Image (tube, rainbow, N blue to C red):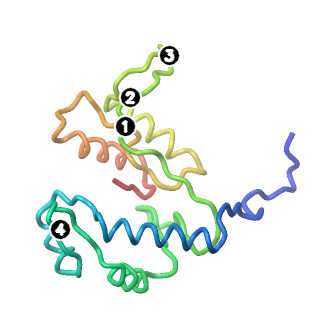
Amino acid sequence: MVPEDINYLASPRLKVLGGDGIAQIHQAVLQILENPGVRVHDDEAQRLLIQAGASLSKNNFVTFPGQVIEETLDKLPSRLRLYNRNGGKALDTGDKHPYFATGLFCANILDHQSDQLRPFLLRDVTQAAQLCDRLDNVHLLGSLGLPSDVPADVAPVKAIGAVMEQSSKPVFF
């Protein structure tokens, strides 16, 4: 039995990495973004990134000079506040509270009635969104699954639409 006077949200946060470990990961990410870079398939996105200081390599990867990344990071706010569609606070990254989100676009689901693995259907997306809307410790919703029973070219739109119909929590996709 859990003692009622323990506030787990106010407990110390787990820190796996110290400053040196974080700095090493940051430097490794900068190196990867500079060489080899990332594949960007959308022409408009490529154009905007190049306009902002990125380059297009011989092998068609978008590469980012470390200085461009650092300057961009310096412009970011120190905290992010998100609100639900009713105007209520959903999360604030500055308050040291842990926040949780659903997964996104899983191909299959373990059917709770048949105990069989099967492709996600739009009704599963709807039911998962209904459940997550009622879970106080789920703060952001994505479509947990990619429905296989609608045309592939509209499946993401249909899925996110179903999530938005079931919840006022912030939605990501």
Towards the viewer: 131 or 102: 102
Which residue is depicted at the point 45% across and 37% down? 128
Report the residue that reaches farthest toward the left.
Answer: 43
First reached walking from the N terminus: tag 1 or tag 3: 3
Q: CA distance from mark 2 to mark 4?
A: 37 Å
Which residue is depicted at the point 16% across and 41% down? 153
Towards the viewer: 17 or 136: 17
Q: Quadrant of the N terminus?
A: top right
Residue 123 picture location, percent across and down? 35, 30
Seen in the image, is 132 located left or right of residue 166?
right
Which residue is depicted at the point 35% across and 50% down? 164
Q: Of the numbered discs in the image, which one, if any, rests on residue 115?
A: 3
Mark 2 in CB contact with mark 1 (< 8 angstroms): yes
Label 2 Cα crowd, 10 Å radius (few <14 / some 14-19 / many 20+): some
Q: Of the numbered discs in the image, which one, if any, rests on residue 57?
A: 4
**Residue with the mark numbered 1:** 145
SS category of the residue bearing label 4: loop
Residue 104 picture location, percent across and down? 39, 45
Towards the viewer: 44 or 145: 44
Seen in the image, is 82 located left or right of residue 96?
left
Mark 4 in CB contact with mark 1 (< 8 angstroms): no
